[in-house]
Image (cartoon, rainbow, N blue to C red):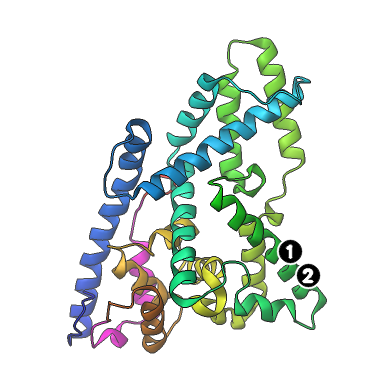
């Protein structure tokens, strides 16, 4: 469908080729989970770069260590953070086995990779985008406060990604729950360990607020922008983080899927998502210039409507959570 040289197609032909490319993209994404689980267990090379695999491994190991830190605190061992390698490996393996958890870490790794790429190529600041800067300067006190909170959160995200870390408090609620279930399972058969795990879980849940996470803040800001949220569908204006959330909300996709759509082999999904989110063909082309400068949309792409693009995406079944 999307080639280096533009070609003219009828509306029905455009849909057929986009549907075929989406199916290929679905198959590719569907293979990500099994391949990543194999690579994380065996240190082999594959279609994923060493950087992506290392970053996913680092984030998952970091989550496992944080969970064990909380258990140590609950056991009164706050000064001792030297955990059993077996416990770290067992927790990490449980998290890797969870498709949604693995997909989320993969999506964050892709998001950071794209963030670094656009910073190098377009000088796009990884923390303070033009849109976020404008929101911070908003005369509305609530908007400005939320934007300032996001600025701090995005700064912490960049630091964590550079260290290949993932703070517990930044996990989506369902994935934090998955981590706590894995922690519970680790303690099965040991009454004392179960008590410490339960206390740790209670403390973690008490201190958690999904609305204060980076992703929660972005979603709230984009939602409250209303019709002006179209501005967030420009990656060079909004920055990668806000762009991905706006794309997910606008196209009715999971944000992790929106992040995976930035990769090679997902051009059809990206074009459909941008169209479904309401961008005009010229604006879709602008995003491809920023994200994939060597790729052109075919002539006739404008014949595809937003509703039809959304319908095609809705028929897609891919790997996060499944």
Nearest the eye: 118 or 205: 118
Q: Quadrant of residue 298?
A: bottom left
Residue at 67%, 26% in the rendered image: 81
Task: Pick the residue in front: 116 or 205.
Answer: 116
Residue 193's tag is: none
Report the quarter where the C terminus lies: top left
Q: Can you identify the residue that label 2 sits on?
A: 145
The residue positioned 24% from the left and 60% from the top of the image is 23
Q: CA distance from mark 2 to mark 1?
A: 6 Å
Residue 216 in view: no
- Residue visible at 79% across and 80% down in the picture: 140
Q: Quadrant of the N terminus?
A: bottom left
Locate residue 156 relative to residue 276 in the image: left or right. Answer: right
* Residues tagged 2 and 1 counted as in contact (Cβ below 8 A): yes
The stretch drawn in magenta includes residue 105: no
Q: Which residue is mark 1?
A: 149
Q: x and y percent of residue 143 in the render?
A: 75, 74
Q: Which residues are magenta?
A: 297-318
On screen, residue 257 versus residue 159, left or right, reads left
């Amino acid at each position: 469908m999307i080639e280096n040289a533009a070609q003219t197609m009828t509306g029905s032909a455009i849909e057929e080729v986009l549907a075929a490319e989406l199916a290929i993209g679905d198959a590719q994404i569907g293979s990500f989970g099994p391949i990543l689980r194999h690579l994380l267990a065996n240190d082999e090379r594959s279609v994923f770069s060493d950087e992506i695999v290392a970053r996913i491994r680092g984030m998952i190991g970091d989550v496992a260590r944080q969970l064990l830190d909380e258990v140590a605190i609950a056991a009164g061992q706050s000064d001792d953070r030297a955990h059993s390698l077996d416990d770290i490996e067992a927790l990490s393996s449980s998290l890797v086995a969870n498709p949604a958890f693995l997909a989320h870490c993969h999506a964050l790794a892709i998001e950071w990779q794209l963030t670094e790429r656009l910073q190098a190529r377009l000088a796009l600041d990884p923390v303070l985008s033009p849109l976020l800067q404008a929101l911070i300067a908003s005369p509305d006190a609530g908007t400005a406060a939320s934007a300032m909170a996001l600025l701090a959160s995005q700064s912490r995200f960049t630091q964590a990604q550079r260290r290949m870390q993932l703070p517990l408090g930044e996990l989506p609620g369902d994935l934090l729950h998955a981590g706590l279930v894995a922690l519970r399972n680790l303690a099965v058969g040991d009454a004392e360990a179960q008590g410490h795990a339960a206390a740790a879980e209670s403390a973690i849940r008490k201190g958690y607020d999904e609305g204060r996470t980076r992703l929660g803040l972005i979603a709230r800001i984009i939602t409250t922008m209303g019709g002006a949220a179209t501005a967030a569908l420009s990656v060079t204006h909004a920055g990668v983080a806000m762009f991905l959330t706006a794309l997910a909300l606008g196209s009715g996709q999971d944000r992790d899927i929106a992040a995976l759509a930035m990769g090679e082999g997902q051009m059809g999904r990206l074009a459909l998502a941008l169209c479904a989110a309401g961008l005009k063909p010229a604006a879709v082309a602008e995003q491809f210039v920023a994200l994939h400068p060597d790729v052109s949309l075919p002539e006739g792409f404008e014949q595809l409507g937003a509703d039809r693009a959304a319908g095609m995406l809705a028929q897609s079944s891919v790997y996060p959570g499944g």
